[in-house]
Image: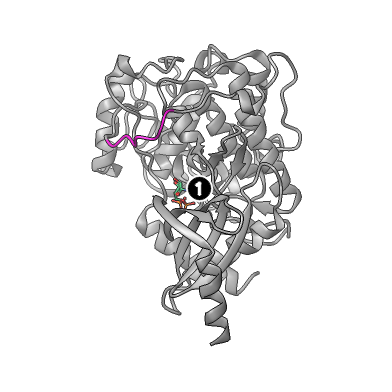
């Protein structure tokens, strides 16, 4: 009873305002802290039925965020149970990187892009130093405050790593940001998975659209290899031993410059090191920084997006990557089609069809023969950027179960 009274009292401290968004586990509200006058964001998480175990994910987020106090990581101000829900109180953030990337009124200079990526890498460096993997890096999980500071948010999928034998689920990250080792089913992985996702975000800032938009895991690998070349076993010796490894037809790596013609030399150099296939050789967040001018823009001078209006329609995208055409498992090969590549139509769902039909209009950066346009002029396409796929509901249920099991029985 005393506990209940206490939670009520704490809850009364916050004055609820409008809904800011809906997350995987619950609604996020804007609120005012009546004690400090500070605007906050409150994530309300259903505690759920005992067996659902939703609370373990929330508890993990709380536990990890308490360890991760750093300028480029979202601050968890408070957390408390109230009624049937767990409430996580965060510092309020004005916008996120996805809104910046999508805002067609914003011009991003090379210095602006460096600034966003440097802040992202700084946040990651701190996580990795504390042995935490974020595992859900994507532009809408990078929140931006009114002073332009970028902070890593949404630690619902984050995990402690570092123990050499620890095995994890590979069903993490939204597909477009998944590292190749995850797509090949590895259970033992490290901080490189976050660096790969950061590289995808870096590329997205340069292109102003998602770089590698796969419609299935196999298609995602096809898109990666079409854009960056098929890795050889000598380039990535452990690849052939990964659980879901399949052989893809060899595609030579096109010069990265052809995909990102406007990027500065040091940006391109860093990007190529972040996109290294072998996770053992991939650059770490700590080693990743820019070496030459232009310097990263001061965060408070970064361009601000206009107020959010969520685009709805799916629209343009890249064309298809290589397709698996031969039998499953080890003997599968992936063949490029004659005009660039053709997707595996059997794998496509309705959303993918929408995306791929609009792809033809937009051109693609992933096929080596057809580099993408560099500028963000959506009017050329007459369309808005595609909705991002995220972990689907089947994945989510599986993942939730898996994560909760991992939480209960850490290996
Ligand atoms: P998801 O589970 O879908 O990744 P979250 O639960 O973290 O997302 O958040 C859902 C939405 O709430 C976000 O897309 C964002 O719009 C908003 N949001 C989350 N945290 C904050 C914050 N600290 N400040 C402002 N808005 C936030």
Where residue 325 sits, quadrant-wise, is: top left
Whether residue 310 is in magenta: the answer is: yes
Name which residue lies at 46% across and 15% down: 374
The x and y percentages for residue 216 are 38, 43
Front residue (pair 382, 182): 382
Within 10 angstroms of label 1, few (less than 14), some, or many (20 or more) residues? many
**Dividing the image into 4 quarters, which one contains the C terminus?**
bottom right
Residue at 55% across, 43% down: 137
Magenta range is 306-312
What is the x, y in percent for residue 379? 31, 16
Residue 310 appears left or right of 230: left
Residue in view at x 61 percent, y 62 percent: 78
Residue occupied by mark 1: 173
Observer able to see residue 234: no
Q: Quadrant of residue 345?
A: top left
On screen, residue 383 versus residue 133, left or right, reads left
Q: Position of residue 170 (x, y in %)?
A: 53, 54
Give the x, y percent position of residue 126.
72, 45
């Amino acid at each position: 009873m005393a506990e209940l009274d206490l939670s009520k009292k704490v809850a009364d401290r916050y004055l609820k305002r409008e809904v800011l968004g809906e997350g995987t586990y619950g609604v996020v509200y804007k609120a005012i802290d009546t004690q400090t006058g500070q605007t906050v964001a409150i994530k309300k998480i259903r505690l759920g039925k005992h067996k659902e175990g939703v609370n373990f994910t929330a508890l993990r987020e709380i536990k990890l965020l308490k360890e991760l106090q750093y300028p480029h990581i979202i601050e968890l101000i408070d957390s408390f149970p109230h009624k049937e829900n767990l409430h996580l109180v965060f510092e309020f953030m004005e916008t996120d990187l996805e809104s910046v990337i999508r805002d067609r009124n914003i011009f991003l200079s090379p210095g602006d892009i460096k600034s966003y990526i440097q802040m992202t890498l700084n946040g990651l460096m701190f996580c990795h130093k504390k042995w935490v993997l974020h595992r859900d890096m994507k532009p809408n999980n990078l929140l931006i405050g009114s002073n332009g500071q970028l902070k890593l948010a949404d630690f619902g999928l984050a995990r402690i790593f570092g123990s050499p034998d620890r095995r994890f689920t590979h069903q993490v990250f939204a597909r477009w940001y998944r590292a190749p080792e995850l797509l090949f089913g590895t259970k033992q992985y490290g901080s490189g998975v976050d660096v790969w996702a950061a590289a995808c975000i870096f590329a997205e800032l340069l292109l102003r659209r998602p770089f590698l938009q796969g419609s299935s895991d196999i298609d995602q690998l096809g898109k990666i290899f079409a854009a960056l070349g098929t890795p050889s076993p000598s380039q990535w010796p452990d690849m052939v031993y990964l659980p879901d490894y399949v052989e893809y037809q060899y595609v030579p790596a096109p010069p990265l410059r052809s995909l990102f013609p406007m990027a500065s030399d040091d940006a391109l150099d860093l990007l190529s090191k972040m996109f290294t296939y072998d996770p053992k050789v991939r650059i770490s967040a700590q080693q990743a920084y820019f070496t030459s001018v232009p310097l990263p823009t001061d965060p408070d001078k970064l361009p601000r997006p206009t107020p959010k209006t969520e685009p709805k329609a799916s629209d343009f995208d890249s064309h298809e990557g290589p397709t698996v055409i031969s039998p499953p498992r080890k003997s599968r090969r992936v063949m490029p089609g004659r005009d660039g590549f053709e997707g595996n139509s059997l794998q496509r769902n309705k959303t993918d069809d929408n995306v791929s039909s609009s792809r033809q209009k937009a051109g693609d950066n992933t096929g080596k023969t057809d580099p993408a346009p560099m500028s963000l002029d959506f009017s050329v396409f007459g369309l808005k950027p595609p909705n991002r796929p995220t972990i689907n509901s089947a994945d989510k249920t599986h993942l939730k179960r898996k994560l909760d099991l991992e939480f209960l029985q850490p290996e």
